[in-house]
Every structure is written in C-alpha cells, then in structure tokens.
Image (spheres, rainbow, N blue to C red):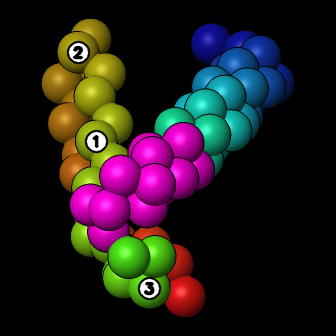
Amino acid sequence: MDEETFNISTRKFLKMVGVSSQREIEHAVAKAIADGTIKGNEKLNATMRLEIGELKLDVKFDGDIALQ
C-alpha cells in the first residue's frame, strides 16, 4: 500500500462527501422551510453512515444540526 496515495484518496473522498452532503442538507432545509414542514428554528437530528463492504466497515455517526 502507498500511504500517500491512500491519504490523498481518502481526503478527496471525504471532501466530496462533505461538500455534497452540505449542499443536500441546505436544499432540503430550504424546501422544508418553504413548504412549512419546519419553521427554521429547529435543531435537527442527523445520522451519517460510512460503509465499506470490502472492509466490513459499517459505522454510524449521530449529531445535531442547529438552524438557529
């Protein structure tokens, strides 16, 4: 295994996940506020799952996203 290649590849994957996830959350929040599903002052419970089948890795991360 090449440590540098692994490190760069992992960082690229995590950056893509972070940027894409933030965009999806922002769009979903804007839509939910627009259609009245939420008011915009909530704290939202969020779960992120990381799965890598070849490694039998399945990890769940829980947290909150505060809107105000």
Tell me the CA gap for discs 1 and 3: 25 Å
Quadrant in which residue 17 is drawn: top right
Residue stretch rendered in magenta on the structure: 26-38
Mark positioned earlier in the residue sequence (3 or 2)? 3
Q: Nearer the viewer, residue 59 or 18?
A: 18
Which residue position holds label 3?
A: 41
Which residue position holds label 2?
A: 53
Residue 16 image position (x, y, % from top left): 66, 28
Residue 31 image position (x, y, % from top left): 45, 46
Tell me the CA gap for discs 3 and 2: 38 Å
SS under mark 1 = strand
* Residue 16 in magenta stretch: no
Tell me the CA gap for discs 2 and 1: 12 Å
Disc 3: CA contacts within 10 A as few (<14), some (14-19) or many (>=20) = few
Tag 2: amino acid? Gly
Residue beneath the point at 32% across and 62% down? 36
9 w.r.t. 29: above or below: above
Which residue position holds label 1?
A: 49
Magenta-drawn stretch, dominant element (helix, strand or loop): helix
